[in-house]
Image (tube, rainbow, N blue to C red):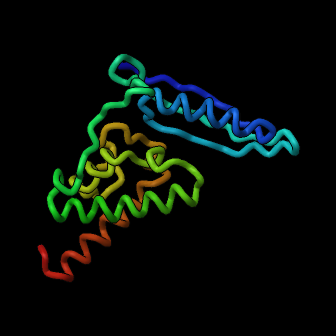
Amino acid sequence: MSVQLKFFNLPFSHLDEAEEKLNTFLRAVRVVDMERHFVEAGSRSFWAVAVEYHTGSDAKKNIKNDTRAKVDYKTVLSQEDFAVFARLRDWRKDEAAREGIPVYVIFTNEQLAEIAKLKPAALGQLKKIDGVGDARIEKYGAEVCKLISAFNMSTIREGRV
């Protein structure tokens, strides 16, 4: 499996059409990282989006017949890890809404579950998680470590250690 990079421009004049092309592409690949920037150009303003993604047969999904099983993280994770996962998931939802992006662009559920198990205290520990690269660590790592630290402190205060 190799990593590729694809660029999209989403002009305001045809935003719906360009947005659909981007979303169709995102559903067909396994996204590693995504960067977006607003380019101010008057009536020609647009969003520039760079998508880093995996290629190969394992990365492709059948868009019409996505038969992946849904994971019930409450049964897969320990009670403590699920509490961390739920807190991270709530943060991710708020962050995605604030940025106007899909939640999975920030972190996938699988990545959140790994973070919940690992409970990283330092940014470098996030690199151990598949698909979490420098850009995500730079953008979201400090907040994730802060959430983990706050959870650990509340656990200690409640005497659950």
Query: What percent of the width, then of the height, locates residue 109?
Result: 34, 48
Kindly indicate the quadrant of the structure image that contains residue 161: bottom left
Q: Residue furthest top?
A: 57
Q: Position of residue 87 (x, y in %)?
A: 34, 65
Above or below, 84 against 117 in this view is below
Q: Judge from the rendering whether residue 15 lies leftward or rightward of residue 151; answer left or right.
A: right
Q: Position of residue 139 (x, y in %)?
A: 49, 52
Q: Nearer the viewer, residue 158 or 126?
A: 158
Nearest the eye: 118 or 89: 89
Residue at the spot x=61%, y=42% of the render? 36
Q: Please report the residue visible at 84 percent of the width from the left and 42 percent of the height from the top.
A: 41
- 102 up-or-down from 54: above or below: below
Residue occupying image coordinates x 52% and y 55%: 96
Quarter of the rendering containing residue 65 = top left
Q: How many marks?
A: 0
The quadrant in which the N terminus is found is top left
User: Residue 72: x, y in percent?
Assistant: 23, 50
Residue 141 image-quadrant placement: bottom left
Horizontal placement of 136 versus 50: left or right?
Answer: left
- In the image, farthest residue toward the right: 43
Q: Is residue 140 above or below residue 83?
A: above
Which residue is located at x 31 percent, y 62 percent?
A: 86
Left or right side of 12 for 43: right
76 sits left or right of 107 in the view: left
